[in-house]
Image (tube, helix red, strand yellow):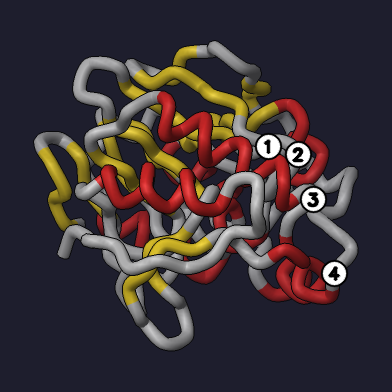
Amino acid sequence: MRPIADGIFQLDGFPAHTVNAFFVDGMLFDCRTRWAAGGIARQLRGRRLSLIALTHAHPDHWGAAATLSAVFGARVAVHEADAGIVKGTEPAGTHVAFRMGKRFLEGETCRDPVLLKEGDMVGDFTVVHTPGHSAGHVIYFRESDRVAVTGDLFSTMDSWTRRLRIAEPPAHLCVDPGENRRSIERLVELKPSLVLPGHGPALRDVDRLAEFASRVAPAPIKETAASIAS
């Protein structure tokens, strides 16, 4: 694990920053695919894991959840609007990427997840419902130091080229791209000091995020250069 800030760790993965998982105060925020379960378990060996908190239920973010839940005795938490996906009763989406993801990236389903809603507390983090990428996408925001775990609201790196930039998620992987843009604006209103995204390095220069949001709403989001934490 790599320290990002005091008490905040990013779990190692390969290639680095492609799909992120963060360990904060005994909680794991997102857990990547089923293939990552062993590596995550090794990195957390000897540590207490109290909860696996999902930002959303796309295959690359929750695939290892059931395995890790069984290994550590930790429950899985997800927004109620995405709960059917992790329970295996609803598909994540109709695009072929979701069908392939279900087949190759998801592990076992989670029978009894903790159902989250707007305003719930996960440790010291407040659940903020930010739909658009998925119906139940959330961010986790800690008021004391203004840290935000933001899932796939936006990414800070192109996973294929490794180029650092801020960009919205692909429209074909969103239930409502316009709603996702409004959710980005809501994040900006929280004035975070450190953003932990689902894809790409942590973002410390959050003024760049505000600039990005102001230029993309309500017009379609375009990419912009960003200062990204190394």
Distance from the alpha carbon under mark 1 to that under mark 4: 18 Å
Above or below: residue 95 compared with residue 154? below
Badge number at residue 131 = 1
Distance from the alpha carbon under mark 1 to that under mark 2: 5 Å
In primary-sequence order, the first of circles 4 and 2 is 4
Where does the N terminus fall, quadrant-wise? bottom left
Which residue in the rendered view is the most extreme toward the bottom?
161
Could you say which quadrant of the image residue 145 lies in? Answer: top left
Q: Are marks 1 and 4 in contact (CB under 8 Å)?
A: no
In primary-sequence order, the first of circles 3 and 4 is 4
**What residue is at 27 percent from the left and 35 percent from the top?**
24
Task: Identify residue for label 3.
Answer: 175
Q: Are marks 1 and 2 in contact (CB under 8 Å)?
A: yes
Callout 4, which amino acid? His
Distance from the alpha carbon under mark 3 to that under mark 1: 8 Å
Q: Are marks 3 and 1 in contact (CB under 8 Å)?
A: yes
Callout 3, which amino acid? Val
In the image, which is nearer the foreground, mark 3 or mark 4? 3
- The 10 Å Cα crowd at callout 3, few under 14, some 14 to 19, many 20 or more, is some
